[in-house]
Image (spheres, rainbow, N blue to C red):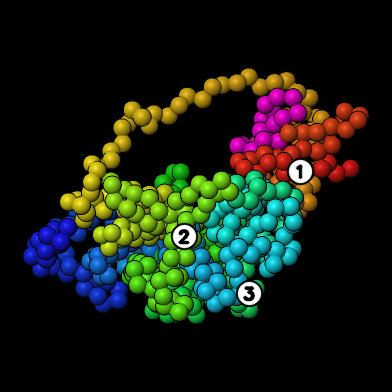
Amino acid sequence: MMLRFAYVLFASFLFFSGASGQSYLRTNLTDQVDELFSHWDQQNAPGATIGIYQDGEIVYAQGYGTANLDHNIPLTPGSVLRIGSISKQFMAMCVAILAEQGQLSLDDDIRMYLPEMPDYGNSVTIRHLLHHTSGIREYLALVSLAGKPEGGVFGYTAKELVEMLSRQKALNFEPGSQFSYTNSGYFLLAEIVTRVSGIKASAFALQNVFEPLGMTSTQFYDDRNAIIHNRAFGYSPKPGGGYSLDILRSDVIGDLGVITTVEDFLKWDQNFYENRLGIGTDDLINTMFTRGRTNDGEELPYALGVTFGSYRGLNTMGHGGSAVGYRAEFLQFPDQRFSVVILSNVSSFQPGVLAQGVADLYLDDQFKEPSRTNNPEQTQSEISEILERPILDMSDFVGEFYSDELDVSYSLLLKEDGLYLDLRGLASELIPYSEDRLNWGRRELIFSRDENDDVSGFRINVGEIQSLEFLKLK
């Protein structure tokens, strides 16, 4: 690969200047990168920024598309974007620093710091939260069931989320018994950092991570009214063409919330090779790289906010992310000291595929396996089986139903064309599946009856969340 880089040093004398004033060499390889992103290089559409790192330097950084469609402000390497779940790495580092300081242990029961959380009989530890083995229900599913989906018109606060999670009467599974990726764990880690440190988790990260690394354009964004210099707004495609502005009405951080630039992110990438945080030893990075294990000893690819894997025979480390209107990818090849970071401000972007495409260009002579290609015959959509709807007396299900776990009421209304569930003014049709079982999209409602055979309530099953109970109000 060094031969390849030596070659490109002589291949071009053109330079591109980033927002920081840093000049990036233009080469045949960077031209091929530009070609990969050409679809998004438009003045009237959102797009992405890319940073390519080699041996501690940015070898190329570029912006494609528009950061602000209202004012036609272009994306640049200095544009500030949300990185979604890549934020988990930074919150994990905050927890690791507190552990290094002796202020907590990763094996502490979370109820030591979050006493309002229920006692489920089995201890849920900080380590369980870090490795996604806690069994705690996914808060994004819960707020959606409560009529406040992420990106919707109804926002929610961190305080409300803690209260909601503390009302949950069951876990998805016994802590440590399996891996199940969930945002709830890292949100609760942010709450623990706040309570242990005595300052907001965002301030702790600023003082202990971002400022020591010199990441001047990076922060946990938990103030919806803050003015962010060089901010790129998030968008989603509209069905009829064009884009709509996506707004995240939440101050929740931990599982998400970091905003940064591809130029700033280099400093975080390099810290994995030579740690400058905490007391500055490798112990902190070793903690970050400690993979989770299930109760039966199975080692997981997930460590503390980072996922280990491989691509074309080379070891990889990194994480993907998405937030309302944003997508991101951090792909590091540690043995080659090479990384690709892509930050996008449009929800339909696929940064993971493009990050691999960039790696294909720069590490072509390093890979041990051939390039992966998609076979169109293997991606044909399946034809869904059409089932006849059972004949039910839908009037049996009409009424008001309340969940104390969600602190929300559903109204089931009978209209001429069927039964509808009204939640915060939005009505959705319920599809009969079998006796006392109705489907609400991918959610399953299983009804119960009293001794008089009258409907008394129902349980919702969606994904790993099972038996979320609603009782009929009289």
First-in-chain label (2 vs 1): 2
Task: Using the image as rendered, state which of residue 40 and residue 68 is in the foreground.
Answer: 40
The tag on residue 196 is: 3
Task: Using the image as rendered, state which of residue 332 and residue 419 is in the foreground.
Answer: 332
The answer to whether the residues at label 3 and label 2 have Cβ atoms under 8 Å apart is no
Spot the residue most to the left.
10
Please state which of the two labelled residues, at mark 3 or mark 2, is closer to the viewer.
Answer: 2
- Res 321 visible: no
The answer to whether the residues at label 2 and label 1 have Cβ atoms under 8 Å apart is no
Amino acid at pointer 3: Val
Which residue is rendered at x = 17% and y = 58% of the image? 1
Compared with 19, 376 (above or below) is above
The tag on residue 469 is: 1
Relative to 442, 383 lies left or right: left
Which residue is rendered at x = 91% and y = 30% of the image? 451
Judge whether residue 234 is colored magenta: no
Q: Mark 2 points at which residue?
A: 290
Amino acid at pointer 2: Thr
**Which contiguous range is marked in magenta?**
427-445
Judge whether residue 439 is colored magenta: yes
- Cα separation, mark 1 vs mark 3, equals 34 Å
Spot the residue most to the right.
452
Residue 174 placed where, x, y %?
65, 47
Please state which of the two labelled residues, at mark 2 or mark 1, is closer to the viewer.
Answer: 2
Task: Using the image as rendered, state which of residue 461 and residue 238 is in the foreground.
Answer: 461
Amino acid at pointer 1: Glu
Residue 324 placed where, x, y %?
50, 56
Magenta segment, prevailing SS (helix, strand or loop): strand
First-in-chain label (3 vs 2): 3
Q: Label 2: state its secondary structure.
A: loop
Relative to 164, 234 lies left or right: left
Compared with 403, 130 (above or below) is below
